[in-house]
Image (cartoon, coloured by chain):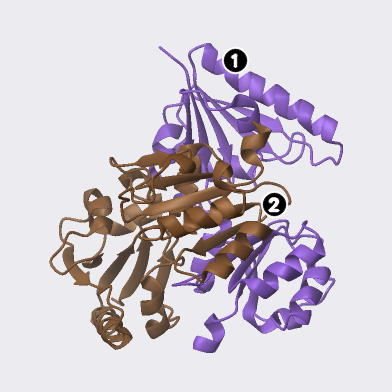
Chain colours: A brown, B purple
Amino acid sequence: MSGRLFALSTGPGASDLITVRASRILGTLDILYAPAGRKGGDSLALSIVREYIGEHTEVRCCHFPMSADSAEKEAVWDEVAAALVKDVDAGKRVGFITLGDAMLFSTWVFLLQRIGCPPWLEIVPGVTSFAAIAARAKTPLAMEQQSLAVVSCTAPEAEIAQALSQHDSLVLMKVYGRFPRIKALLKQAGLLDCALMMSEATLPGEQCWQHLHEVDDDQPLPYFSTILVNKQWRDAQ
Amino acid sequence: MSGRLFALSTGPGASDLITVRASRILGTLDILYAPAGRKGGDSLALSIVREYIGEHTEVRCCHFPMSADSAEKEAVWDEVAAALVKDVDAGKRVGFITLGDAMLFSTWVFLLQRIGCPPWLEIVPGVTSFAAIAARAKTPLAMEQQSLAVVSCTAPEAEIAQALSQHDSLVLMKVYGRFPRIKALLKQAGLLDCALMMSEATLPGEQCWQHLHEVDDDQPLPYFSTILVNKQWRDAQ
């Protein structure tokens, strides 16, 4: 029997927002790799998929350091990629779970860079956090000739400001720790009233702020906080 | 019993790329509305979800004209929105299916504009076509500080050119009928070698063009064709 590797997107957080395909594959794996933020810490991705994991699946948590030291990070990516390939070579059905969609702002991409595109690899796409936020907030992402930009708040401020001026609709990811700067940029662009912020969308701790001018700069925010801007929507209501 | 309305994203095309939540809701509906491109024509969305539809669910196909006449389109949106609300008022569990994700370039948004945000409405997000294309082509959308723009090829050429120059990664949707113009824009921006085109991703008719300079301007393309540009990926391989 020849081995397989599945990169499985878990979706935004609620267990039933995973795809039917990923849920079925999870029941058939020999080994499942689950990323964890902290060493020995819980894996959010694992908690999302737990109900679908097969009885005989061995779960291995792997810790990816948030370190700024790129040599340290690259060593971990090398190591995990090598472990995945080794298990596939041994004929195992192997899974790697990843929050949201595997191909967007995901650690999985660093593993893909190392593994390449072998025929035994399948990537299963998932619901992105921003699609879930749009659905929960009942605020569309884009329609007709509009354009959507998905920007990380870790990008240079000038790039964020440029995107804010040029697109009809924007998703600002990784707000955590950068809210005061982003709020100031939104205010400067006259877009505070077209923006909303959501944390942990579709999870029990979900929070939504519809009026960002009322949110204090020192408001403690959960790690997964995202801002959605739609310039034309509120006016149209 | 009080009525409910579910806007259900079908995902990109393969039946098992729908969410577990949408698949379960489909089994419990009294009435399912399915959009069809042509009058009396088949509904792609309906073919994706057929296996999940409950035995007692009444399926109603509705035709949305592709007309340039906005009065004609608005009349249809008014009519379908009114029909959905009427069924909910009668205590029914009603579904409306929509390709890809409900909040991105979807007819559903025109219905949402008319229905508003009543408490009986739930929107179930889905996998976007471009997440599926990235997964199938094993080409990431964005990582780290990169930004992604999702642009419709129906947008003005200058806007598309600007987005091409400013973002690391781009999704160009609605290529159909506009391929020669888009190819010329990509060539002008020096991005032909960083682009790939995919049609009907995850469906049996899926096609992928990895080398756009080899694709003739008069190449017949399926209606659902999308171009993915990632400036940094191929170099990194």
Quarter of image, res A69: bottom left
Q: Quadrant of the N terminus of chain B?
A: top left
Residue B41 horizontal/vertical position (percent): 73, 39
At mark 1, the secondary structure is helix
According to the picture, the residue beneath numbered tag 2 turns out to be: A146
Could you classify mark 1 by the number of other residues whose Cα lies within 10 Å: few (under 14), some (14-19), or many (20 or more)?
few
- Say which chain tag 2 marks: A
Q: Are marks 2 and 1 on the same chain?
A: no
Q: Is residue B207 above or below residue A223?
A: below
At mark 2, the secondary structure is loop
Q: Is residue A90 above or below residue B223?
A: below
Would residue B147 be found to the left or right of residue B74 on screen?
Answer: left
**The one of B119 and A162 positioned closer to us in this rendering:** A162
Q: Residue at x 27, y 51 (%)?
A: A48
**The one of A171 and A63 positioned closer to us in this rendering:** A171
According to the picture, the residue beneath numbered tag 1 turns out to be: B86
Residue B109 horizontal/vertical position (percent): 63, 38
Residue A15 horizontal/vertical position (percent): 31, 46
